Amino acid sequence: MRFLEQITESPFALIPVSQKPNFNSSSILKGGSFLGSGLFNWLFECHGFLHNLVLIVSSLCFVLYLSFQAKKSFSKLSNGRSHIMIAYYGCLWLVSLLNLAWCCLQAWECTSGKEVAWNILSLFTTSGMLFLEVSLLAFLFQGNYASGFEALTRTFIVSGLVVGLDILLKALYLFAFGIPLFVDSNEHSHHVKWGLWVVHRLVLTAVYGFILFMYHSKWRERLPARPAFYKYISIMFILNALALFASGLSGNGASFGFWLYGATIVCYHAFYLPLIYVTFLADFFQEEDLHLENVYYSEMKDAGFFDADWE
């Protein structure tokens, strides 16, 4: 009787209420369509709007800059005939496109079913950027504009071996042991993952720190005399030291460490490629411009265009 009274008092008592509605509420709030929901998730859901905006805009702007300068750069590289510069410029283009794809596809990190694709993309992108780091050090220690297949081959072999070992180790962590190296979440500490990043950052910090020590010691004359090179080394030392500190904190579950590590990743993917372009390639292209200006000046002087200035 009590049950019949409840039915009489509540005519909606027998209507089931779904606990998991089959529609996406964000699509209604953010545009009224699944297309609007996808755009919302792409920009906002994974790491937040500011994180994704900085990565996408910075990487896109750099690729556009390379595109606008491509015709002039190709002309200068072909005239200069420097094998190292040509190879490095090509590697920079390839890594820049990979980094642009990585920045634009941040939503894959937070999408189920995209874990393998995200790990592969992240592995190749970070390995490409590490290849540029190692190659830059090797190039500069052999001379700023060293050319020839022997120097190029020697440098690429050393860089390839270092990056190859790095890829192999990370691939084992990802696909053999199932450790989410490229999925950043503060919900789980993943001590093994953060231990790997601590070792990785420790090695890079030690290398950059050793170069800075040589620069301020009696062995300074053995290093290349390029101020831009040491500014680059200082920036990379600070960035890797912060990433090392953040990895250690994140391994212990500290929220600040996770935030700081994310900030270093954003700075690395957003600004490292422009930094390496300014450090290594911009001077080469600029000096080519100055060389052409000197040639034009000499030709005009020989033709007598400046004789009136002496009268």
Image: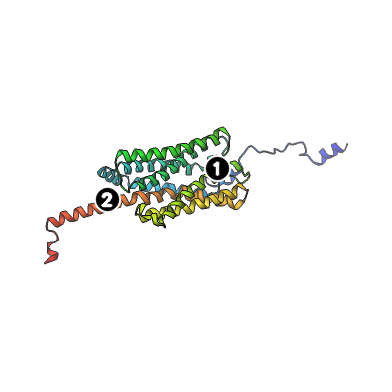
Could you say where residue 200 lies in the image, as x and y percent from the top left? 51, 44
Q: Residue furthest right?
A: 1
Q: What residue type is disc 2 on?
A: Glu
Residue with the mark numbered 2: 288
254 or 238, which lies in front?
238
* In this view, the mark in front (2 or 1): 1
- Identified at 31% across, 38% down, the residue is 150
Residue at image position (82%, 41%) is: 9
Name the residue at 87% across, 38% down: 2
Q: Find residue 282 and report its horizontal and vertical position in percent.
A: 34, 51
Return the residue found at the far top. Answer: 176
Q: Does any portion of residue 54 appear in the rendered image? A: no
Q: Which residue is mark 1?
A: 196
* Callout 1 amino acid: Leu
Which corner quadrant holds the C terminus?
bottom left
Relative height, residue 138 to residue 215 (above, below):
above
Colour scheme shown: rainbow
Instruction: Give the total number of marks visible in the rendering.
Output: 2
